[in-house]
Amino acid sequence: MSDQVTPAASGVRPYAVAGAPLLCDARDHGLTGDGTSNDQPALAALVDRLGDAYAADGRARVIYCPPGVYAIRDAGTVWRSGVSLMGAGPGATRFLLSNDANRAQPVPLAFYTAREHGASPDRPLAYCTFADFEIDGSGVASAEYDPLAKGLGLQYVNGGLFRNLFIHHTAATGLGCDFLQDTLVQAVRVLECGRMDNGLEMGGAGIGIGVGGWGPVERLTVANCVAVGNATNGIFLEMQNSDRPPPRGIRIVGCHAEGNRFGISDWGVDGLIVTGCTMVGNLEAGFQVSAKGTTGIPGKGGLLTDCLIDGNLRDGVSIGNTAGPYTVRGNRISGNGRYGYHHQDLGESDQPAAEEIVIESNDIWGNSLDGIRFDRPLRDAVIINNRIRNNGRQCAPAATGGGESVRYTENHLIDQRANWPADGHRGKVLRVGSRYAVVAANDATSLTLAPNRPGIDTSWSADTPPPKTPYELPAAPAGRGGITINAASDSVTIRGNLIRDTSSGTQLSGIWITERGSCLNCRVVENDLDGNRTAIRADTPAVGGHWAGNHGDQ
């Protein structure tokens, strides 16, 4: 009888390499979890040992870290295929990152990159799970912002799982991983990450995922994650390789993004699906499509469906620099500080017209300016079956004040002599001398101010003004429409929309074509425009097309 052992599966031995257990208790391998000893050297040694074992026998290993505080100082750990890291849950198992003795080192908990370690589709991280622990990045600092100062910074992951993680106060992105194939990011909470990012640097997000490393399809799902108070994006996808096709196959499902600069952003995916998400209280936009990424490639062909997009400081949905198509369907887009839906140029005014934009069956109401606004040329767009009502809430005239009735807090202005319409100043810039702040909401005598940037307490650009200091608020814009066309529009269909102002008297026009806008061969039919001060206002007359059956347009 032969002594040869036949592997149980291709490349996998039926028995593990001697001395390399499949499940390791970190306390048995040099990690203390006492919050005082530096556990990074022991963790790195254990990862290398288990990674070597996986390479030898094909059997994935798990490092289990019991409850405790594991100090990771002055160096990150280069991760290996076949090694998973699991804890007893956020709050119980904590990794505390710091670099007091080496400020030049960014110190992620785990990293593996193309530039430093040769990561590639041929050398991916395979069979790695990171689950049930917390990463505290508050101890990492440097003289200058370093985009590698992440919680987790991995590239080319195949078959990965990131689950039940709490990552907070990292200097750069919390979970900043690129090129994730057959990977699930689930129930990850990211809080106030990117604290050293001024909002203009690379990264600085809660969850930031680079795409474009595996070819035309990357199978990735981000599900049930929470991103709050992160410096740039709560969750974003960014195309990394300009010479490759934007990938398909990526979904963001059931996530919550609040108090970030942008809630959820598509910076270069083909056919991104965002569904069932909540995007509230973000300082720029709830959802954004743009070419702001490193390669300048915008998202296209995406679907934004069944989301709540409410109370963002500027736009609810901001679409810019995409050639299209893009579909926005079945969302509630309400109470935003500027526009509900805004199609705009983002620094690239020579871009061609966007084609095949679909805005369908959304509930768009209570936004400060226009419900839907087009500031960029469109062709073959479809706006159908939306309810667009009671927008234009930023209707209060210019206001000034000062003296005995006026006082300030970090987040409020109170003027007991004022009598402002509810939310009539929302979205305006309040100026107090050289200081400024942005109004998030107001009642008759007080302004609630938005944070000056994510993750900080004060709303002011400088120190809080002393009592009695004079203030000024600008006037409201003269025109506010349900649908405003402020760019060239060719063969656009606007059909079956309910565009009303039933109670507020602030949505001045149902449909408004501005002096800069135009409509060529457009089909505007069967819209209910009753209740607006002007049903259709055409500062530039429409040319051709078909306009008929619009109720309220006598």
Image (cartoon, rainbow, N blue to C red):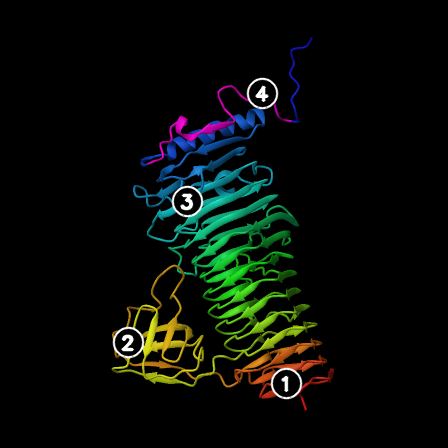
Name the residue beneath numbered marker 1.
530
Residue 339 magenta-highlighted = no
Q: Are marks 2 and 4 in contact (CB under 8 Å)?
A: no
Looking at this view, is 345 or 341 the one in front?
A: 341
Over which residues does the magenta segment extend?
Answer: 11-34
Which one is earlier in the sequence, the residue at label 3 or at label 2?
A: 3
Q: Secondary structure at mark 2?
A: strand
Disc 1 residue type (three-letter): Asp
Query: Mark 1 vs mark 4: which is more N-terminal?
Result: 4
| Mark 4: amino acid | Tyr
Please tell me whether mark 3 or mark 1 is closer to you in this view. Answer: 1
Disc 2/disc 4 C-alpha distance (Å): 74 Å
Which residue is identified by label 2? Answer: 407
Mark 2 or 4: in front is 2
The amino acid pointed to by label 3 is: Ile
**What kind of residue is marked 2?**
Arg
Residue at position x 46%, y 53% in the image: 206
Marks 1 and 2, how far apart in space?
A: 42 Å
Q: Are marks 1 and 4 in contact (CB under 8 Å)?
A: no
